[in-house]
Image (cartoon, coloured by chain):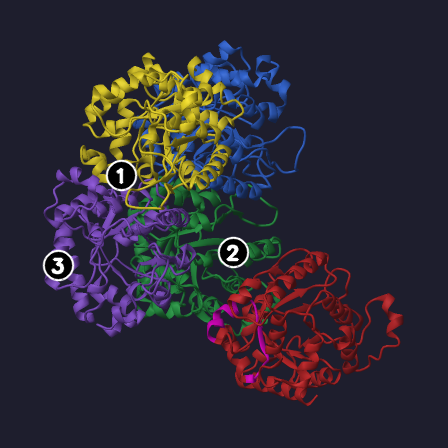
Chain colours: A blue, B green, C red, D purple, E yellow
Amino acid sequence: MSNAVDQIIANYAGETPGVIGNLRRLLNTGTLAGTGKLVILPVDQGFEHGPARSFAANPAGYDPEYHATLAIEAGCNAYAAPLGFIEAVAHRYAGTLPFILKVNNSDSLGGPEQPCSALTSGVKDALRLGCAAIGYTIYPGSGLRNEQYEAIRSLIAEARAVGLPTVIWSYPRGSGISKNGETALDVVAYAAHIACQLGAHIVKVKPPADFIEQKEAQKPYEQVPKATLAERVQHVVQSSFNGKRIVIFSGGASKGTSELLEELRQIAKGGGFGSIMGRNAFQRSQADGAKLLKDAMAIFKAA
Amino acid sequence: MSNAVDQIIANYAGETPGVIGNLRRLLNTGTLAGTGKLVILPVDQGFEHGPARSFAANPAGYDPEYHATLAIEAGCNAYAAPLGFIEAVAHRYAGTLPFILKVNNSDSLGGPEQPCSALTSGVKDALRLGCAAIGYTIYPGSGLRNEQYEAIRSLIAEARAVGLPTVIWSYPRGSGISKNGETALDVVAYAAHIACQLGAHIVKVKPPADFIEQKEAQKPYEQVPKATLAERVQHVVQSSFNGKRIVIFSGGASKGTSELLEELRQIAKGGGFGSIMGRNAFQRSQADGAKLLKDAMAIFKAA
Amino acid sequence: MSNAVDQIIANYAGETPGVIGNLRRLLNTGTLAGTGKLVILPVDQGFEHGPARSFAANPAGYDPEYHATLAIEAGCNAYAAPLGFIEAVAHRYAGTLPFILKVNNSDSLGGPEQPCSALTSGVKDALRLGCAAIGYTIYPGSGLRNEQYEAIRSLIAEARAVGLPTVIWSYPRGSGISKNGETALDVVAYAAHIACQLGAHIVKVKPPADFIEQKEAQKPYEQVPKATLAERVQHVVQSSFNGKRIVIFSGGASKGTSELLEELRQIAKGGGFGSIMGRNAFQRSQADGAKLLKDAMAIFKAA
Amino acid sequence: MSNAVDQIIANYAGETPGVIGNLRRLLNTGTLAGTGKLVILPVDQGFEHGPARSFAANPAGYDPEYHATLAIEAGCNAYAAPLGFIEAVAHRYAGTLPFILKVNNSDSLGGPEQPCSALTSGVKDALRLGCAAIGYTIYPGSGLRNEQYEAIRSLIAEARAVGLPTVIWSYPRGSGISKNGETALDVVAYAAHIACQLGAHIVKVKPPADFIEQKEAQKPYEQVPKATLAERVQHVVQSSFNGKRIVIFSGGASKGTSELLEELRQIAKGGGFGSIMGRNAFQRSQADGAKLLKDAMAIFKAA
Amino acid sequence: MSNAVDQIIANYAGETPGVIGNLRRLLNTGTLAGTGKLVILPVDQGFEHGPARSFAANPAGYDPEYHATLAIEAGCNAYAAPLGFIEAVAHRYAGTLPFILKVNNSDSLGGPEQPCSALTSGVKDALRLGCAAIGYTIYPGSGLRNEQYEAIRSLIAEARAVGLPTVIWSYPRGSGISKNGETALDVVAYAAHIACQLGAHIVKVKPPADFIEQKEAQKPYEQVPKATLAERVQHVVQSSFNGKRIVIFSGGASKGTSELLEELRQIAKGGGFGSIMGRNAFQRSQADGAKLLKDAMAIFKAA
């Protein structure tokens, strides 16, 4: 057992040993085992954006086997995906690679007028498939916010009882938020805080931009250091119960390697607990993708 | 056991001993124990207004531990917060500091068109976390009023059966009420009365302003003394089953100390059962916040 | 047992003995016990119109105790009120004064666009509190009519199974009905009939005015005697399954004593089963209110 | 918060905050608050042995009020009793005096051939009545052992979920155990260990005698120090997960004061967590009973 | 991933990925990770034989912490114990040390006339505590056989659905079997086969002696090589679906080191999948116990 992991786990006192055990599995797997940091491979883009937009750049990614292999080869802490992708590989990798079952998903073909993912799997699936956690997307700012907050409340309770922690993808989106506002510092920090208040064990948000969306927030943010990404990440971590909840950052759309690695350095410097990086990893060749994930781990390991 | 507490408890005859027991815990904890008065620290502003708007003024407040500590140091009767903040400290303070689990919450990023908080936790969470009560916000005046009244009815029934009393935050809001009307005397008194009729054990409202919103109410209010806040508080207490239900007053946005203390004196003079004071307490330094809470308690103790 | 009560009860053959038993309690309590007539004190105006509009004229009425006392002193058959008011006195008067729990309520601060009260308590509350019946308001004419008819259907079934009769407040209201039409003879008779068809054991309507709202009804009403209130009441009673369901009449807004007593005489003359009189009773001094109720009983007793 | 209590609570890490909170209430109430020691007043003897055998010596004890009063006056940590005795006083003392609801009971008029108490109340009763724990008797050695172990397993799970800890009265009894064997050192230590393995939060056993019942245990006990009661108590504490579960000792039949106090000194010296003392307390006058309980507390406080 | 583990896992094709995942966790933990062999530390003797008989020889063993530490230090694949012992350490070791929750237990103070353990915990406990498997004892030969076979059938189904494999302790015992017969080759092989047929994922039996209990079995056993323990173990493995189910052997009462190691060599030589060794390990000093476990692992590793 490592001090870094123990210190994080201590913030979850009061949780069931089952939840604690799975948090430990996530923190004690892969290259970053024992460091208290996480690099997770998420592959729900096929569902969210369509297969070709996701996998044409590296057609190996059409195969669910590819991603589990990539995650293991690169030494990731965990692999997150929707039901089908997990079912396709669970038999082979359960007990070796921690899975995070993404229990709700949205496609880009259509849907409700207000942003709201569909529940596509559940806690019983996660147990059946040997997963280490469930994942759920909320859209703070959506007119269907209430439905989502109430759904995640039930899911967390159900998952806790059977020893599964919950990861919340907290993505602000909806009629009251501008496109830029979705990654505004005030909005991202707020979204992280909401996820923590809803009982998330791990929170995933986007890297916050140097922009304040809400008029009422302008003044308080005058005193928040926010010039660098590291400073903004630090504020998001602070907003996540002063760092007492694990908050990780997504990489967003694929981008240049040096730009991405600099972003990760800033996240690490700001105290982010890690990165959840999909397209940037699987849209390259396996060798390049694995290298990038390993470089990411090296950055967090050094932090 | 004190006479003051016994007299209040007598108004709840017919309730289960479990509910009575938790009301006693609330009334017999902290500096005001036994006086029949309450000063409660509520910290749901991170959820309701965002973390920076709530905690940037005193960054210690980003940490859930801070508020539990502040409540204990200041001698509060109870600490009210959403699920995440309670979960982060329950293991350490359960059995010492009475928690009020705020089971619904609204953020200011977006939501349904008519005011309606999302259910973010429930009675089972409150039991699991060792809470002494649940809290729920209704918005009289909302087009979604019916949904809220029916939800709180179910929650109160569920909570009563397991010995938990219910605090209703009654905040008039909606298309039929003007901005000023939200704190109008007739509207606040009405909102308090509705909460009592719905079965609330404790009602929280805003201090009523010297303003009458509803046309039909103008005439009856001619004979209601309302020049001072104390008189207006007295009318709200009267509207809360003639003082047979505990009604407490929120402090609202942070303001100057002397202004705030004068407000509390008026509330105490008018027979208010106490104050639930968040931003005014935690947006100052810990020393100043604790002092303010203690000054508030001194005012109610003297009443 | 009295003949009058037996004759009424005979119309409910087929009901569960529990429902019959509670109908008997209502008919065999107070000054009118055994006469087959009822005078009921309802106090839901605090919820429906606000506390000051209801109680400022006689501030004793802010106190829930007051109304129970008034009902007993005056010799009423029953006392009807929302959850909170009943809970505040049930412990003291259960088994002595029959309660009718008004399980839905509407406030005048706002709400759904179409008239629809919120469900604020239920059958289990009625049992817990020792009530003799439940009461429910429907708004024939409302765009949300279907929701209300379906809700009352479930409630009656639930209540019957546990031995509780149901009183329906049948108040025509909605976009298709003119203000005058709400008390039009054809509309009131129609509303009473709908309530009977929905399975009400007791129906409450407003005294019908000499006005026909619906074009299609003009012709048939040519042959219905309707010049006097007594005749119109007779028609409403006739429309309530030819008098085989108990139908009682509300007093409406407070008015002059002699005007009110004349109205009651007409109701009695027309075969109305009684009166349900709130504001006219509790907005006077206790002595005056009790006297009025007793005068009303005298009128029905003489009928 | 006291160090002594915190150290004990740390042994229950993994429990829900609700359970922890109620353990804290038990440890932080009365004269021994904060010492980590407990003196509990149990009054189930009326059920177990009959009222006159229990209360004739001090007829005040026929009244359920007497025992709650005695427990409070003496400064006990808790009061344990069957359903009826708790119901008779819960409304008055809930929230002040922690109750332990004894959910199974046996009378001495008859029953199954093998020792087995009847389930006489449950977890929902405990919540309704505002209790801090439930209590349950097992009879290791009974031919109906399996039924009891399986029943307590379900009860503990149900109680944990709602934040209630469980006290197991572990009384060896049955055809395979001699009368002396019921308090034999090996048997009492074994009974305490079984209760801990079944998941008890607090275990109650009888003071162990200097006697070894089981043939197979003779040899291992050669090396266990057992000459004094303190040494034997120490062995029982050791057998209760090396002191990581709270184990308290009953006083048994009433006896002379000096003999009893010496017994308590030995229990305290041996590291016992406290005493649960019924007949010795309530079969004396109230003054004498309270004095004895206070003397007992003084002994544990000094330990 | 190792070939040895993959070959074993292939025999469980058709099981849920969750069950497979936990079998992998058991096979991939500790010193023997990846070898397809298991050495498991079981500590239920406190419950089965009493604490002093189990722990007096090495009093450190009274403490539940000791055994988890010993299992980790020695590099065991898993630690098996009853509810209480697991609860006492789960929070600290969940996710690190695989737990097998022994869900039924028997004490030696008394019980039903026919051998039958009591159900003392269940699948939900196993999930809550983060266990990797459940364990259950059947007594083939018991008059209560049917109850046990039916209970384990339900438990396996419940456990499978949530991803937990089941270990069956198969111990022949009952009126129709002689004392020697309990370890007779025909009886042990039969007991192993029954456990496999009941759906066990892992079977635990005692090392078979050179003795045939059943008259009808004498003749067929003439052609079964059985002179050495290795040959007899081979027959038990053969009887366990020709080695397609994992069968491990208990060590029984503590014995001399060289005798024990020779027994293990025979088990390994006969193709046994491993050893589950309690008293021989924890009744020595921690250093000696750990050394013995490591020596056992070395034997299986070399096999």
x and y, in percent, of residue B117 in the image: 53, 48
Distance from the alpha carbon under mark 1 to that under mark 3: 34 Å
In the picture provided, is B9 more to the left or to the right than C178?
Answer: left
Q: Which residue is mark 2?
A: B171
Q: Chain of mark 2?
A: B
Residue at image location 30% in from the left, 36% down from the top = E44
B294 shown above or below A41: below
Mark 1: give few (<14), some (14-19) or many (20+) Cα within 10 Å: some
Q: Which residue is mark 3?
A: D261
Looking at the image, which is closer to me, A20 or E269? E269
Specify the segment rendered in magenta: C74-92
Q: Nearer the viewer, mark 1 or mark 2?
A: 1
Q: Which residue is mark 1?
A: E49
Identity, as a three-letter code, of the amino acid under mark 2? Tyr
Assign a secondary structure to mark 3: helix
* Residue C269 showing in the rendered view: yes
Identity, as a three-letter code, of the amino acid under mark 1? His
Labels 1 and 3 within one chain: no
Looking at the image, which is closer to me, C275 or B212? C275
Q: Chain of mark 1?
A: E
